[in-house]
Image: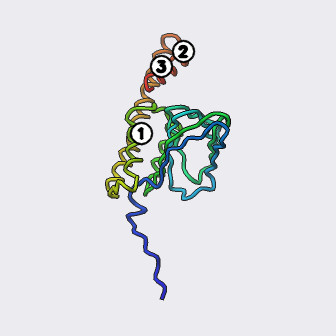
Amino acid sequence: MDLPIYQDPIESTLWRVAGYGNEDYAPGRVYRWANAGRAPATTITAQMTRAGRVALDLPAGRSIAGVGDLMLFRYGEESVYSKIDPQDRYACRWVNLDGAGLADYYEAFRLKHGQIIGVGPTGPVADQLGHLIALADPAAATPRTAMAQAVHTFVISLFAHAERRHFLDRALRDIFESQRGGQQEADVLGREFFE
């Protein structure tokens, strides 16, 4: 008699780091990934640029992530990311996150804030990303519930950061438009405040 393969339901339910890395691509080395064929479609990647620039190409257009920008994408979506100039160096650190309902959080975030968000090369979000990587190291032997809590904290921190940035960008835009009609100055000040 064949028995079904047992999979612990907690394994696919609790939020977790399903993979992580610190990568450095030298000038001339190809760096390009297409997400459409990657699985599982529940995997969300949060990737911070540490050096160089990367383009995220979506059906709606292209976005650029520079140093201190966090790029978010989902396996299975129609997106491709690559170095803008193959002759440039590109370095990043990333985590693949998975768990029940996480893709819903990603979709809500993406629709409101986009897939690239400036968080700065140092600061709370960068620190939390490093903390997730440290917890995911097999040598850390992190309990599943502690990992789930850390991933949740990271995701909620991204929402909080983006909401603060959105609020301040809007306030600065309103101030400059009422004073001078200057959207460009508001954008520059908003970026400087967060970096």
Residue density around tag 2, few if under 14, some if 14–19, many if 20 or more, within 10 Å: some
For the point 59% across and 50% down, the residue is 77
Residue at (32, 57) in percent of width and height: 143
Q: Secondary structure at mark 1?
A: helix
- Amino acid type, residue under disc 2 in the picture: Gly
Using the image, tell me which numbered label, if any, was put on residue 189.
3
In the image, residue 71 lies at what x, y percent? 53, 40
CA separation in Å, label 3 and label 2: 11 Å
Q: Which residue is mark 1?
A: 159
Would residue 161 be found to the left or right of residue 58 on screen? left
Residue ID for mark 2:
182
Find the residue positioned furthest to the bottom: 1
Q: Amino acid at mark 3?
A: Leu
| Image: 2 above or below 165 | below
Q: CA separation, marks 2 and 1?
A: 27 Å
Marks 1 and 2: in contact by CB < 8 Å? no
